[in-house]
Amino acid sequence: MKLILVFFLILIGNAVAVADEHKQSNIPVQSCLSGQSITIESTNDKGEIYRLWSQKQPNNKLELVMANVKQTPLDIKQITFSNDEAISKCTTPIALQQGGQWGWHVLWSESMVQNKEPEKLSGLFYARMDGESWVSSLPKRLSKYSPINPRFRLDNQNITVTWQQRESDFTANMQAVSQDEGRTWEVTAIHP
C-alpha cells in the first residue's frame, strides 16, 4: 500500500487517503514546499463522503478546509485561521473521523518554514468540527513539534493519537489520549 501511495503522490502530485473500517488513520505528513498535497476522505453514517485538505485562501495562506463532496457547488468550511505571523505555514491534514452524531474529529500538523521561532507556531493539532453549525472548537495543540508517523485511532468516545517527534538530539515516542471525545487530553511520552 505504501508503494502505491508514494507512486500516486509522485505521479499526480496529490493523494486521497481513506480511513479504514477500524477508524484508524496512518497518513504520511508531507511538506507543502514539495508541491504535494494530501486530501483525506471519510464517510459519515449517512454514507456521505467528506473531504479534508489544505487550500490557499484570499490572504495567500494555506488553511485547512473540509466539504461534503456531493454538494454542488462545494460548500467549503474553513477549519484553521492563521494569524499574521504565519507567513510560511504548511498545514497538512492527518485524520478526519465522524464523532457520533455531533460532527467530526480533525487532526492536522502545521510547520513553519520561514519563521525565526518555528516552535511557537508548529505542531500537531486537534479540533472538533460541529456538523450542523460548522464551527470548530479552539484547536488543541498536542505537540509543539512537527509529528513523524502520526496515527489516529477512534474507539467510541476514546481517541488515541501516537507519533514521534524530534527534540534536540533525540526522537521521542509520544501519545495523546482523550476519553471524552476530544474535549480533554493527556499527553505523555511512551517509554519502550
Image (spheres, grey):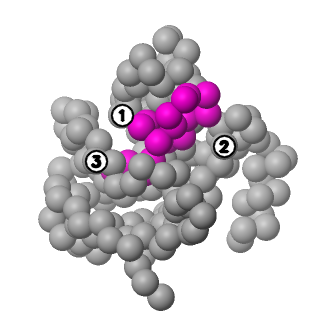
Q: Is residue 130 left or right of residue 59?
A: left
Which mark is first along the chain, 2 or 1? 2
Q: What are the residue bounds of the magenta stretch?
A: 110-127
Q: How far across and how far down the image is residue 67, in percent?
A: 42, 36
Q: In the rendered image, which residue does mark 1 sit on?
A: 79
- Residue density around tag 2, few if under 14, some if 14–19, many if 20 or more, within 10 Å: some
* 150 relative to 89, above or below: below
Q: How far across and how far down the image is residue 151, in percent?
A: 48, 67
Measuring 15% from the left and 65% from the top, which residue is drawn there?
180
* 49 relative to 181, above or below: above
Q: Is residue 26 left or right of residue 107?
A: right
Q: Residue furthest top?
A: 58
- Residue density around tag 3, few if under 14, some if 14–19, many if 20 or more, within 10 Å: some
Q: Is residue 31 left or right of residue 165?
A: right
Q: In the rendered image, which residue does mark 2 sit on?
A: 31
Q: Quadrant of residue 170?
A: bottom right
Q: Quadrant of the N terminus?
A: bottom right
Amino acid on which disc 2 is placed: Ser
